[in-house]
Image (cartoon, rainbow, N blue to C red):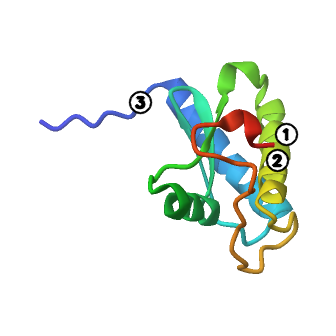
Amino acid sequence: MRILEHGDADEASDRDLAVHIGHILEKHYPNHPWLIGFQGRGLVIRHLAIASEMARIVGREGFATLLPRESLGTPKEVTHAAVMFAGELLEAFQLPRGAWDGRPPIVPTAWKYKQDRAFQ
C-alpha cells in the first residue's frame, strides 16, 4: 500500500497564497521572473535575474528575501506587502516597475556582502 502525504491545511493555504501572489506580481510587474513560495511559514520572494546576478557577484546561490508571515497579517495584507516589496526590489536593482525588457539588474554599489545595513 502506498500512502501519499498531502501536507497540512496551512501548507495548502500557503501554496495557494504563493500562487495568488505570483499572479498579482505578474499583473503589476509583467515579464519579471518571480519565484514565490513559503518556507518555514515565511514568504520567500525571489527575482531570478537578480538572484543570478547576486550569485555572480558574491559567488553564492540563493539570494532571496524572506518576509515573516506572522508579521504580515491577512492574506490581503501579505499580498500588498509582497507587491510593495517587489517594486522596491526592482528599483533597488534599477529594473523597471513596469514590464521587464530583459535588461540585467545592477547591484547597488552600497551593497556589501554580509553588510545589510548599507543596502538601502
Q: Is residue 29 above or below residue 8?
A: below
Which residue is disc 1 drawn over? Answer: 80
Residue 7, horizontal then vertical, whole percent = 41, 30
The residue lying at 73 percent from left, 78 percent from top is 103
Residue 98, horizontal then vertical, whole percent = 87, 68
Residue 77, horizontal then vertical, whole percent = 83, 31
The residue lying at 73 percent from left, 33 percent from top is 117
The residue lying at 75 percent from left, 62 percent from top is 26
Q: Nearer the viewer, residue 8 or 63?
A: 63
Distance Cα–Cα, label 3 vs label 2: 27 Å
The residue lying at 46 percent from left, 25 percent from top is 8
Which residue is disc 3 drawn over? Answer: 7
Outermost residue to the top: 70
Q: Are marks 1 and 2 in contact (CB under 8 Å)?
A: yes
Which residue is disc 2 drawn over? Answer: 83
Q: Which mark is residue 6?
A: none
